[in-house]
Every structure is written in structure tokens, then in C-alpha cells.
Image: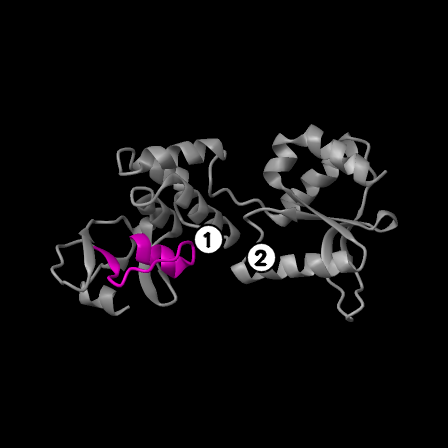
């Protein structure tokens, strides 16, 4: 916060420092990255002079910062494609939305550093930033099961465990001791939830349940493979 205040009105945290604030990429840099609409000459601040539109900035944890989409756009020119994809994955897991989508920012800034890499990632993933709700995914999953003649599970089912907890799962076939969890980057609200889901999976496995995780993209792009696998699991 001190670095942003020192850079003057309109300054925001960005680049590596912005990514660290959002929790999508760690940084060991001791000098904070700041974006300001005017020139900033301070040795303790790595400042860039950029006039950002209002829809590319926000406030997070009380600190002015570039939006998650703008942060990823800036990171695209500063990290490798693999590192960029990892940061995008963290943003998906954290359900970090932005007023302007990543695809829209790529179109807005077509010649920015690293934009070519980002454009390819957006193209390959059918447009990052689209939020798939739990109800969307559940409806699509039940329709998929019907299309392939697979038995309908109990949805939003409570599973009693030996420790006294009764976690809710997305879909359960009790006779087969099989659970399907429907995953989408628009579902996990926090990284903590993501970690807790995995711990719950282990607890269910210990008690004889098999847990499979199915994503929106798998449901859309790998229908035949997914149907064959569930057929075996439900045999």
C-alpha cells in the first residue's frame, strides 16, 4: 500500500506485485511493481507510466491494483507461457472475475508484450473468463447421462462419514459407492475451498467411496471417453 501511495493519485499495484496480491503467482521481488498515469522517479518502486482505463483497475484488500484480467495481460509479457498458464489456472481456481474479460483485453491491446501467447491460450481454452455456474454444470451433466443411457445419481447428496461429518457431494450412486464431483473454475470461491475439496476426497476414499472429478471442458469435449469410463465404473 505504501508503494502505491508514494506513486501518487491514480497509481495501482500491477505486474508481479499485482499477481502476488491476487494470489495467482508468487514473487520474490523486493521492489514493488506500480503502474501510474504519470512518471514516478523513486528508487524503491518499479514504476511504469500507463494510463489505465477504469475497468482495468480495482481495489483488493484495500489496495488499488490492476484487475485479475489486466494483471494476466501484463504478466504475459514478463513470464513464460507455462508460467502464464499456471497463473491463469490459479485465477480460475480463485474465481477471480473482472469487469472486462481477458479475451476482451487481448482484443483491446493487440500489440502488447506477450499478447500473442495470451491470444493463443484464450483461443485454445475457448475464451478464459467465462463463468460456469454449478447449476449450469449439473444440468449439462444430467443431460449427458441421459444421452448415454447412464443411471441417474442422487444430486447434492449428503454422505455420512465415520468422523461424524456429512459432506455434500454433487452426484452419488450409492449402490456403486461412486461419487462424481463437477469442477469448474467458476465454482471454487477460494484456494482454501480447493484444498478442502481434496482433503474431503481422501476421507471419502478411506471409507470406500470412489471419487471422480469431471470438468466442464471434459463434459463438452470428451463426451465419448467420459461415457465409456463411467460405464465401466457403474458396471
* Label 1 element class: loop
Looking at the figure, which quarter contains the C terminus?
top right
Residue at 53%, 45% (x, y): give it. 131
Above or below, 41 against 56 in this view is below
Left or right: residue 177 versus residue 102 is: right
The residue lying toward the viewer, choosing from 22 and 232, is 232
Residue 223 visible in rendering: yes
Disc 2/disc 1 C-alpha distance (Å): 14 Å
Give the residue at x 35% y 58%.
27
Say whether residue 190 is visible: no
Q: Name the residue under label 2.
A: 194
Label 1: few (<14), some (14–19) or many (≥20) C-alpha neighbours in 10 Å = many
Q: Disc 1 marks which residue?
A: 96
Which residue is drawn at the image coordinates 70% and 31% (left, top)?
225
Q: Is residue 2 magenta?
A: no
Where does the magenta region start and end?
15-35
Amino acid at each position: 500500500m505504501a508503494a502505491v501511495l508514494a506513486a501518487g493519485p491514480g497509481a495501482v499495484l500491477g505486474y508481479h506485485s499485482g499477481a502476488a496480491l491476487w494470489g495467482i503467482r508468487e514473487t520474490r521481488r523486493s521492489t514493488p511493481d506500480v503502474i501510474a498515469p504519470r512518471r514516478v522517479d523513486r528508487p524503491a518502486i518499479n514504476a511504469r507510466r500507463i494510463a489505465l482505463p477504469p475497468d482495468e483497475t480495482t481495489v483488493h484488500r484495500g489496495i488499488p491494483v490492476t484487475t485479475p484480467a489486466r494483471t494476466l495481460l501484463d504478466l504475459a509479457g514478463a513470464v513464460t507461457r507455462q508460467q502464464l498458464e499456471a497463473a491463469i489456472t490459479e485465477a480460475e481456481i480463485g474465481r477471480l472475475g473482472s469487469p472486462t474479460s481477458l479475451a476482451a483485453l487481448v482484443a483491446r491491446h493487440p500489440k502488447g508484450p506477450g499478447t500473442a501467447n495470451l491470444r493463443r491460450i484464450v483461443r485454445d481454452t475457448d475464451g478464459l473468463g467465462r463463468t460456469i455456474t454449478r447449476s449450469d454444470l449439473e444440468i449439462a451433466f444430467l443431460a449427458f447421462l441421459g444421452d448415454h443411457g447412464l443411471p441417474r445419481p442422487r444430486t447434492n447428496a449428503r454422505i455420512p462419514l465415520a468422523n461424524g461429518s456429512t459432506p455434500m457431494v454433487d452426484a452419488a450412486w450409492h449402490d456403486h459407492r461412486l461419487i462424481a464431483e463437477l469442477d469448474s473454475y467458476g465454482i471454487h470461491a477460494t484456494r482454501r475451498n480447493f484444498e478442502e475439496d481434496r482433503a474431503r476426497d481422501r476421507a471419502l476414499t478411506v471409507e470406500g467411496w470412489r471419487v471422480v472429478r469431471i470438468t466442464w471442458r471434459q463434459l463438452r469435449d470428451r463426451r465419448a471417453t467420459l461415457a465409456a469410463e463411467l460405464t465401466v465404473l457403474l458396471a
